[in-house]
Amino acid sequence: MLLLFVFFGCAKKDSVNNSIDLSEDSLSVYFSKANDLNLSRDKRLFFNKKAYNIVVGQENDSLNRINLFKVANRYYNINDWKEFSQTVLLILDKSERAEDSVNIGKAYSYLGDYYVSQMVSDSAFQFFSKAEKIYDRLGDDVNLGKTLINKANLQYKAGDFLGAENAVVKVLRIIRKEKNANSIMYDSYNLLGLISNELGEYDNAIVYNNKALAVIDDEIIPEVFQSRATSYNNIGYLYLSSKEYSQAKKYFLTGLEQNNLKAQKPLVYAMLLDNLAYSKFKLKEDEGLPELFYKALKLGDSLKLNSCIFTNKIHLSEYFASKKDTTKALEYSKEALLLARSTNVSRDILVALKQLSIIEPKKAAIYNKEYIHINEELQKAERKMGDKFSRIEYETDVIKDENTNLTVQNRNLVYIFSGITILGLFLYIIKAQKAKNRELQYKQRQQEANEDIYNLMISQQNTIDVIRVKEKKRVAQELHDGVLGRMFGVRMNLDGLNGLKDEIAINQRIGYLKELKNIEQDIREISHDLNREKSELINNFVAIVDNLFEEQRRTFQSKLFTSIDSNIKWEEVSNSIKINIYRIIQESLQNCNKYAKARSIRVELKKVDDDLELTISDDGIGFNANVKKKGIGLQNMLSRTKECNGSFEIKSKKGEGTTITVRVPIEQKQIAS
């Protein structure tokens, strides 16, 4: 007889809301539709992929990782194991980078579920053990209980029934004080029922399954999981095993009465149909048979539920054997054996061989020989898997002990090096304070130099203002005493000639017109003088820089070529920029004179877009700008450029000279601190 129990486990199913509010954002809609059981598998995959494409590009924060878990849940529900595992690995990577222990543990648990689906029990056990360590360290008893149940289920499947039972008892002890732990209690009692059934303790198994049924709370364990239908199937199967067929039939019928069972849990629905048919067969109730078997088989085939298909075919083989239809009985048992071999489920192969030996007595010896061989191999594999589980547990304990020892050693190291650390910190503070003092002194000297430059420019401005006042007085005097007096005399003479038309009067008028032209020329010259005054006023910074250039040419032998863009409106450039530009030029020329050994130096100031660009180049010996430690001169230039919110670039190679480019915005914007 084939085991038809269902272990509830930690399903990844989110609650389904079939009524989608289209006013929600697209991500919420995609998540809802990806979990809508009324849609086809392909459509659910399509919507889940849409959700993944939105979430994967978002910032790695807690909400992003929660949404990725939602994506993984839906891949789990759709049985797309490849996408499920890739999504979980992405979550694990993001959680490790964020040092998010809670989600690291959850990702390990999901990877354990993945390897369970792939029937790689040792890898599943290993990841569940990693999750267990994290939840134990965090004191998260609820998730610790779920993880231990998963490990116990693996032990049960490996045939380690006592080990699984001990693990479940441990879980019940951990969660006994936890509120809202009904789902874990349900899983625990459900698994204890499975274990008791394997040990032949049917009465205990029924007690445990009834306890599982009693703790179901629809608010904690959503109806979509169909926990009641699962428990009714399990209890019915126990009565089936103890040959109480009438009682078994009642539970199977009750299970089939659960709402939305076929849509939400098609596997449980198919199993209940098949078990109901089998109990009717055992009760010799031919009504509805074998159609009920066929209905379960058709559903199993459509959903590719291999375990359900195998059981159906074994039951059909038994049914037709009882009806003396050996051909069909043999056909279904051979199909069951072929399916068991293709899925490599050893227990199913044993069941199929046993059925074939009953139907074909002449070949019973051959079937029994293979049965014995596979059974021995199965027992060896189960023992080997049990040993592997024990080894993983042992290695986990060893790691814990090593961590404890490392903790003690680290504590001792802390005591030993505390004095050294404090001494080093003390020395560092002294050194840092000295460096800070030097930096303050340097800044003070720099501030004093800036003040000198600023005072120089203010003095220059005051001088210009004095000259401007004098010039205004001179122009006013010239206009009053010269131009206006002459114009008054010409006007009076022209008035006297108005009534005269002889040749002498005409010649006099011509003479007065020439005088007016002379007065016009005098006014033009006065205007030019005023323009020159304005130009000198605007370009006083240029004059200061030109003085610096002239001093360079007089003092040093290197040729100096300079260019200052006439389009620069210096009145729009702030004094702080002018001061810093002046000092950068001064510092650069000083470096050229002291270190570069340059034959020629070129300085260019120009306007580029809304920026002021200063380029200083020389044909000197150059240096490796990538590795050479920057001296205080270059550091000063960098600092001044930074004060102007500008950019500083230096290009130099040995033997190829040096080029410094400084670019600062003319209009300085306030930068928020």
Image (cartoon, helix red, strand yellow):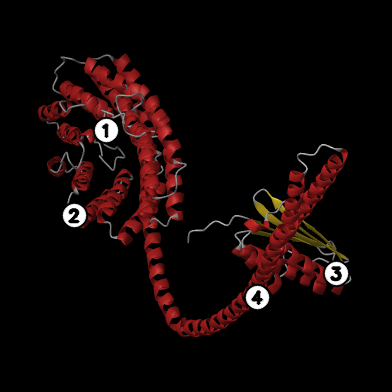
Q: Which residue is mark 4?
A: 452
Q: Amino acid at mark 4?
A: Asp
Vertical arrangement, residue 497 with respect to residue 443, above or below: above
Number of the label disc, if any, that sits on residue 16:
1
Disc nearer the start of the sequence (1/2): 1
Image location (x, y in percent) of residue 536: 73, 61
Residue 624 seen: no
Labels 1 and 3: the sequence-earlier one: 1
Residue 222 at x, y = what percent? 21, 37
What residue is rendered at 18% in x and 15% in y?
288
Disc 4 + disc 2, Cβ < 8 Å: no
Q: SS of the residue at dot 2?
A: loop
Whether tag 3 and tag 2 are in contact, CB under 8 A, the answer is no
For marks 4 and 2, give the one nearer the viewer.
4
| Mark 4–mark 1 CB contact (< 8 Å) | no
Q: Nearer the viewer, residue 294 or 199?
A: 294
Mark closer to the chain start, 4 or 1: 1
Whole-angstrom CA distance, mark 1 to mark 3, is 85 Å
